[in-house]
Image: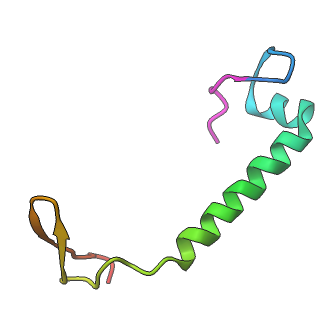
Amino acid sequence: MNTAKIYHDSDGNECSILQMVRREPDWAANRIQEGEKAIEQLASQQPASSPGEECPTYEGTICMSRPDK
């Protein structure tokens, strides 16, 4: 976990992510729920193409390949 990033609480005070979670639990809960929602949306999306299938682009076509499949 990166704890070096500086956040600002509702009073404008600088704090770490761990301090922010303690000071602003509603903010933390909202960020977690929004992250979960984004993950669900990404997981439910169908791939634009199958591996090896050509995909149109503004300059022509590209060949999609996924080394993990």
User: In the visual, does 7 lie left or right of 25?
Assistant: left
The magenta region covers 1-7
Q: Residue at x 9, y 59 (%)?
A: 59
Q: Quadrant of the N terminus?
A: top right
Q: Residue at x 11, y 70 (%)?
A: 61
The x and y percentages for residue 18 are 80, 34
The x and y percentages for residue 49 are 29, 81
Q: Quadrant of the C terminus?
A: bottom left
Q: How is the image coloured?
A: rainbow
Q: Residue at x 77, y 57 (%)?
A: 33
The x and y percentages for residue 32 are 76, 53
User: Considering only vertical position in the picture, is 32 above or below 3?
Assistant: below
Camera-nearest residue between 19 and 49: 49
- Residue 53 lies in magenta, yes or no? no
Q: Quadrant of residue 3?
A: top right
User: Considering only vertical position in the picture, is 17 above or below 1?
Assistant: above
Q: Residue at x 62, y 36 (%)?
A: 2
Spot the residue most to the left: 60
User: Considering only vertical position in the picture, is 24 above or below 48?
Assistant: above
The x and y percentages for residue 9 are 82, 23
Q: Quadrant of residue 7?
A: top right
User: In the visual, does 14 lie left or right of 58?
Assistant: right
